[in-house]
Amino acid sequence: MATAPLQSASVMQPNEIRALIQLLDDPDEGVYLHVREQLLAKGTSVLPALLESREAYAQCAEHERRMDELVEGLHGAFVHKGLRDWFDPGAESALEGAMWVHKAVDPLLDMDALRKEYETLKRNVWLELNEELTALEQVRILNHVLYDIEGFTNAKSGQPDPKQALLGEVISERKGNPLGLGILYLSLAQDLNLPIHGVNLPNHFILCYCDEHHIHHESEQPDNQTPGGVLFYINPFSQGTVINKAEVSEFLSHLELPVDERNCGPCGSVDIIRRLIGNVAYGFERNGHIRQAEKMRKLLMFVETGATETPSPDASAEGGESPGQSRL
């Protein structure tokens, strides 16, 4: 798990870092470029000091611009490395991918503290489960712990809010949008060995409970029928309500979309994280945070490449790519 910042060969002392940061507002461009080069060369080991300085006090506009440029470049490289480390073993955990998406949005996110909160939730569910339960009973237990005991609820808001999809915000605020609640529910289920998977249903992210012998063979699926391995669907946004396959088929027919593996079958973690990034980008854009939206779209492009592109730490955060999925 890549949670620790990258370290350089020689560790810069805190007083050296602070001294360099103070020089970021030097009017001499040559001095600034030298300082910038020194800080970038140390990698993300200097990121905590940069973030602390940025949050603690405001300098002149030029100082802030230069500091933001450094923070975004170094933090972007850190997040990209984390996502590459997630991809390399197969990108199986939606939980880990979602944590890195939240970290991309919030450089100050404490991922270790977030993991501890999640582990507490997982333990609370595990204590209530046993091997004798049926599929529906397992879902009822998970629903009871999440919604009745822990108090999770849906975030019904007319205006899209990117925070409602971010895992840390969902856990701390105990509410989220369909994607935010869905990723949390899915992660708990899969970590507890329940055969529950994400479903990229258009307009509304849901889950499905599959037969343990389910095999993904789209070519063998009859036309206009829900995937055979799916026993039933779950809507985490509606207190974990169980949905039958006929309801999902009817929903898709209203949208004039085929009932097939792509629209209502199990999807992988990478598909879910793509959708999450697009959802967050859409939320930022609708709230007027265009620069944040553009950063998320660039992150989406990185994920689309399989996390194979190597970003330059001093790459500009300006610019954006085509919008990603905004579906919930």
Image: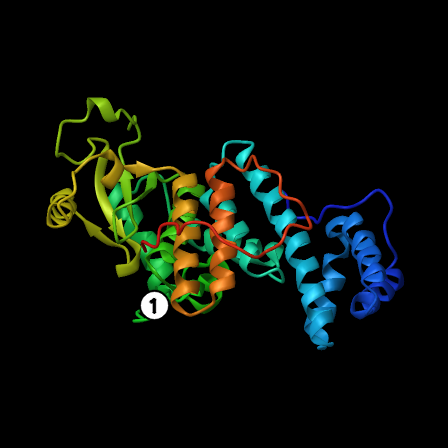
* Residue 134 visible in this rendered orientation of the protein: no
x 84%, y 66%: residue: 28
**How many numbered marks have been drawn onto this rendered protein structure?**
1
Relative to 167, is 27 on the left or the right? right
Disc 1 is placed on an element classified as loop
Q: In this view of the protein, which residue sits in the foreground, 93 or 277?
A: 277
Q: In this view of the protein, which residue sits in the foreground, 65 or 280?
A: 65
The image position of residue 19, as x and y in percent, is: 87, 66
The image position of residue 94, as x and y in percent, is: 45, 44
In which quadrant will I find the C terminus?
bottom left
* Residue 290 visible in this rendered orientation of the protein: yes
x 69%, y 51%: residue: 314
Q: Is residue 268 above or below residue 57?
A: above
Q: In this view of the protein, which residue sits in the foreground, 151 or 197?
A: 197
**Residue at far top of view:** 220
Q: According to the image, what is the colour scheme of the structure?
A: rainbow
Task: Please tell me how crowded label 1 is: few (under 14), some (14-19), or many (20+) other residues with Cα within 10 Å.
Answer: many
Residue type highlighted by circle 1: Ala
The image position of residue 263, as x and y in percent, is: 24, 40
The image position of residue 3, as x and y in percent, is: 64, 48
Q: In this view of the protein, which residue sits in the foreground, 232 or 142?
A: 232
The residue at which mark 1 appears reads as: 155
Q: Is residue 163 above or below residue 277?
A: below
In which quadrant will I find the N terminus?
top right
Question: For residue 103, what is the image quadrant?
Answer: bottom right
x 54%, y 59%: residue: 105
Q: Is residue 202 above or below residue 280?
A: above
x 39%, y 45%: residue: 272
